[in-house]
């Protein structure tokens, strides 16, 4: 982990100054899928952005369930939850998916992307502490508005693909202003898979109001070659587009030789 930390010690300055390179391979993937969106990869070692549609990569959108990554860290750092294994209430009322209709831990909830559990956590944290933490973490536009349990779904919180990748680079290196152990736990619960000496971390997100909806897949790859934070967002035309977020994201990572 030390070598990653050394690479991102000056990340905010370097990320702003890093050069951008369009990837013809990634652009071709989006064109073949007939998807309007962006994909960005931050090569921390080379201080270079690589991707498709730079203008969209700089545009802010609601983070939707990708916010569960900083949300987990904020919940732990503020003491609103004792651990990622503490069970939180799902609450009453209808749930979008049957699997969301039960109490569960953050470890389970982030894997299922269970919104009600994280809404329960947000109410424990409260608006004031949430706002303070977003500023402290320098996450997106830092805005929480007046509704503590919907601001990452309906706004006003918004973040760009470039900002997502910068934030994740700092989390991957343990360089966020939060206890190292809590950052490690947050990384642990978004670890997806490992193969051939490479480990993939990530989280999807989807908000379908207003239409067209916004779909996300963000994360990073760690390997002997370095750490490679990435962020994809795309217009969601229908439920059938849901699998495309990860499929197109993984195809982009493979095209760029990091997965």
Image: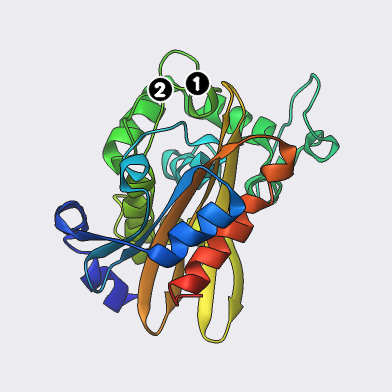
| Residue appearing at x 45%, y 75% in the figure | 258
Q: Which mark is residue 258?
A: none
Q: Secondary structure at mark 2?
A: loop
Label 2: how many Cα within 10 Å (few below 14, some 14–19, many 20+): many
Against 115, residue 51 (above or below) is below
- Residue 129 x, y percent position in the rendering: 38, 28
Query: Marks 1 and 2, Cα distance to the nearest angstrom?
Result: 7 Å
Residue that carries the numbered disc 2 in the rendered image: 144
Against 203, residue 50 (above or below) is below
With 200 as the anchor, is 256 left or right in this view? left
Which residue reaches farthest top? 146
**Residue 190 in which image quadrant:** bottom right
Which residue reaches farthest right? 98
Against 78, residue 172 (above or below) is below
With 62 as the anchor, is 108 left or right in this view? right
Against 210, residue 122 (above or below) is below
Q: Quadrant of the N terminus?
A: bottom left
Residue that carries the numbered disc 1 in the rendered image: 148
| Residue appearing at x 25%, y 74% in the figure | 45
- Residue 127 x, y percent position in the rendering: 43, 21
- Residue 169 x, y percent position in the rendering: 34, 60
**Residue 65 in which image quadrant:** top right
């Amino acid at each position: 982990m030390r070598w990653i930390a050394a690479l991102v010690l000056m990340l905010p300055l370097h990320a702003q100054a890093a050069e951008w390179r369009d990837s013809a391979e990634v652009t071709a993937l989006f064109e073949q899928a007939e998807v309007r969106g962006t994909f960005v990869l931050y090569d921390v070692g080379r201080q270079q952005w690589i991707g498709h549609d730079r203008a969209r990569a700089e545009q802010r959108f609601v983070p939707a369930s990708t916010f569960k990554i900083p949300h987990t860290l904020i919940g732990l750092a503020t003491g609103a939850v004792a651990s990622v294994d503490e069970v939180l209430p799902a609450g009453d009322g209808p749930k979008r998916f049957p699997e969301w209709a039960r109490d569960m831990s953050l470890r389970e909830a982030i894997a299922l992307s269970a919104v009600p559990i994280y809404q329960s956590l947000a109410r424990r944290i409260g608006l004031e502490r949430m706002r303070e933490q977003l500023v402290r973490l320098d996450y997106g536009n830092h805005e929480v508005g007046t509704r503590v349990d919907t601001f990452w779904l309906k706004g006003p919180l918004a973040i760009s693909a470039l900002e997502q990748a910068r934030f994740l680079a700092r989390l991957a290196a343990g360089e966020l202003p939060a206890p190292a152990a809590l950052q490690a736990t947050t990384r642990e619960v978004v670890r997806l898979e490992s193969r051939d000496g490479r480990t993939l971390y990530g989280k999807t997100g989807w908000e379908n109001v207003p239409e067209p909806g916004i779909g996300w897949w963000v994360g990073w790859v760690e390997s002997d070659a370095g750490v490679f934070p990435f962020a994809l967002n795309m217009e969601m035309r229908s439920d059938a587009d849901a699998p495309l977020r990860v499929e197109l994201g993984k195809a982009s990572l493979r095209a760029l030789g990091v997965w």
